Amino acid sequence: MAAKFLATDKLTEWIAELSASRQVLVPVKEQGAVVFRPYGKGVTPVLDRQANVPPKGSIFPASQRLMTFTYTKNPEDLGQVAVEVHETVEAEPTVVFGGRPCDARGFTVFDRVYDCKKVQDPYYKARRENTLFVTLACADPENACFCHWVGSSPSDPDGSDVLMTPIEGGFLVEDVSKRGKALVASKLLTDGSKRAKEAQAVKDAAQAALGEAWSPEKAPAKLLEKFDDMGFWEDVSAKCISCGACTYLCPTCYCFNVTDERKGMRGERIRTWDNCMSFQFTMEASGHNPRPTKAHRLKNRVGHKFSYYPDIHGGVFACCGCGRCIKLCPVSVDIREIVRLSVERPVSKPEKK
Amino acid sequence: MDKEMRIVGFLCNWCSYGGADTAGVGRFLQPTDLRIIRLPCSGRIDPLFVLKTLIGGADGVLVSGCHPRDCHYSEGNYYARRRLEVLKRFLPVIGIDQGRFEYTWVSASEGQRWQHVVTTFTNQIHALGPIQRIGKDAQARACAFGRTLEVDIPA
Amino acid sequence: MPVLDELKAQIARRLPELDMVIGWGHGYDSLHRTPLFIENEADIDKLVFDPLCVHNLATYLTRHGNAKKIGVVVKGCDSRSVVELLQEKLVSRDNVVIFGLPCEGVADLGKVKRALTDLGLDIGRVRETATGGGKLTLTVSGKEVVLPMSEVMADKCGRCRYHNAVLHDEFAGTPVEGQAKDAYADVASFESQTLEERMEFWREQMERCVRCYACRNACPLCVCRDYCIAQSRDPGWVSQRDGLEEKFFFQMIHAMHLAGRCTECGECERACPVDIPLLLLKRKLGKEIKDLFDYSAGTELEIKPPLLAFKVEEDNINERGW
């Protein structure tokens, strides 16, 4: 499909046009952070930087109601209690506008788990099918960006429906999926075929600015080798404070918790984000915890992303290289450093002092 | 007659609960807004009880214990006095009027004083009106994801 | 001798008797430092000390079990956290060796970000940083930007009353003279708004919260961590819902549990990945504690924190005659 062009001064108009029939989520500045919010009157999209919080919640909300339930007592026989369950699958047509390739790509990691042959999560699917991504390619990567390490790039269309590349005077707009075709049909977009080369130059420059990629291809095997090397994990996890910033802000982290929240005779079952860096994550009902220390938990997090997931899913890393875990970690734990060390450092002698 | 406000009272078992009972025995007339929760001692009161009550939607919270120097457990109310004074002064920073929370000391024989406390406090809360909940309009302001679930579970 | 060299020499001398010394090292880019765990002599050379060393390392003292003897490098504000931990007997005096430093202020990376954004630049692209001479000299996107420390210094530094470590076993450098005044102007300014405006402010701020607990885990005095009541189901103080009331109530738990203990180091606010001004709540508490009990957390080793103690006749509490 031929590329289109959108002039900078037509940008807000296009967003407004899209929001006539759908909810459009755009990056917005709040205090010093950038988060996704619904577009509306008076909302100013901020497109020049990566958002602090990825648009993960558009498809996978931080807490999502799965069902409501109501208990009723039989007035004739109060010992008899019936329960009525009401499923709540809902999805509003949505466009995530202005995310980066790493944000949209995160959902390709989710798809292999939530929507595959064995398992189709209806809540996930409903939202996934109703959410489109108009992604902005990166012109200038940041210090913590490493998408090229994990098979992606600053202009990776994987996971997006429309890719916009910033060029002089506006954006090159390319539909990169079947669903994207409908979005670029707007009259506000003119023919952009003559500008395609310019856009390619921007994409190439961004790729070059990233520098050379370090390949984590040996990581899956090396991380497994280090499974029992607690000395190594204690070393790399020493400064971690076991919060959840990295997990909750990661576009590919997909673990959840299901709880029943009940008030008297009524309640709801909700699914909420869960965090493998927290002590309770593997706490068993018996009181035993197979991952009792942060060393164990960091080993799991890095292992999952760079070893276990690739092993199950054909070598694809469960990481999009967005760098949020590095930038937003209160103590600057660097997952790149840990993966590199796991490959380059030999297995240490068992049990440090 | 104003609609009843939701006022919660945390009373210590020995003095204040006894004092409220004395007021009842003496048939002293009081507003009925106050709902009492009995605790062994005012020292048992975690300031978080009061905060959870206010944030959960109560219009006012009253705490009452034994007079200082007369605590049934000797020292409980000394700790309570410090904690609750700090809590009372803290409320304005989160946008809650200090007048919605009061702590007082009522002994078991002070039925009339209890009547006075309840009446005064209830009138104070009525004057302040219903509390603004921090979750107000949350549904309207929330974005599609992280859809906040403050709304009551449908019956 | 420069402060850093003096510090390195002190650590080298004491390291044999210690399991580790915690200091700061270089982080993932030139603007970021990161906690450094020194266990061997070779690690000592990785140590740095400059206005980018923002982390309060006292938070690690309660994570290694009391059995280990740990050395910790602290600035003035950090040392107060160590003292408060000692006051509460959460850390044993025999198990900690305090390497104190003088400090003239640290940079607030949020302010650096704003300053760069105003110039059309991005903090994520800083290639080189030089500290010294009372300014930050940054090379970003091919341009050189000079930011005077007075513009990017953390707010807490402008009102710092303890430039030097208040308690130390070793001290490197010359103590900084002087003491700023702190009249809690930030709290007063916030409270000049109406009650409805204040509550609206918190609504807007807490909407962003993702309940990552970075604020809690970065806090040196929040020691419950894994057993925090905000995450427990029994008792169930807060449900799992991602609601505004739930997120706000967690902040209430945190603030109340820190009343009379918080040293206002600001780590909670710094750690927050979505930039919520959390310190304000603790500052309000600090102000009230100061007014009521004339107490500042973590300044004197022998005092019992006020909410763990009582007086039969209180100096500043009106008995609330009804």
Image (cartoon, coloured by chain):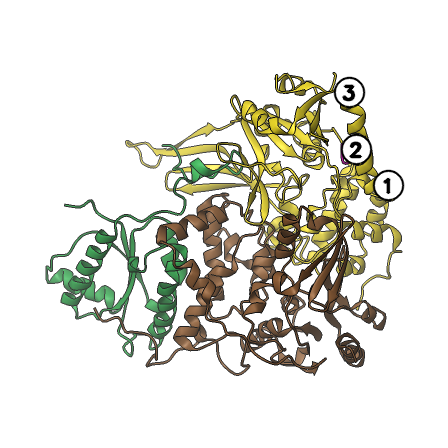
Chain colours: A yellow, B green, C brown
Whichever of labels 1 and 3 marks the residue nearer the N terminus, that label is 3
Image: C139 above or below C48:
above
Dot 1 alpha-carbon crowd within 10 angstroms: few under 14, some 14 to 19, many 20 or more: some
The residues bearing labels 2 and 1 have C-alpha atoms spaced at a distance of 25 Å
Q: Chain of mark 1?
A: A
The answer to whether residue B22 is seen in the rendering is yes
Foreground tag (1 vs 3): 3
Query: Tag 1, which secondary structure?
Result: helix
Q: Position of residue B80 (x, y in %)?
A: 36, 70
Q: What amino acid is at disc 1?
A: Glu
Q: What amino acid is at disc 3?
A: Lys
A154 magenta-colored = yes
Residue under disc 2 on the same chain as residue under disc 3: yes
Judging depth in this view, the residue of C215 and C115 nearest the camera is C115
The residues bearing labels 1 and 3 have C-alpha atoms spaced at a distance of 38 Å
Q: Is residue C237 left or right of residue C4?
A: left
Q: Which residue position holds label 2?
A: A203
Q: Position of residue A56 (x, y in %)?
A: 62, 37
Q: Is residue C198 left or right of residue B59?
A: right
Foreground tag (2 vs 3): 3
Q: Position of residue C250 (x, y in %)?
A: 48, 54
Please give the range of residues in magenta. A151-155
Query: Tag 2, which secondary structure?
Result: helix
Q: Chain of mark 2?
A: A
The residues bearing labels 2 and 3 have C-alpha atoms spaced at a distance of 16 Å
- Quarter of the picture containing the N terminus of chain C is bottom right
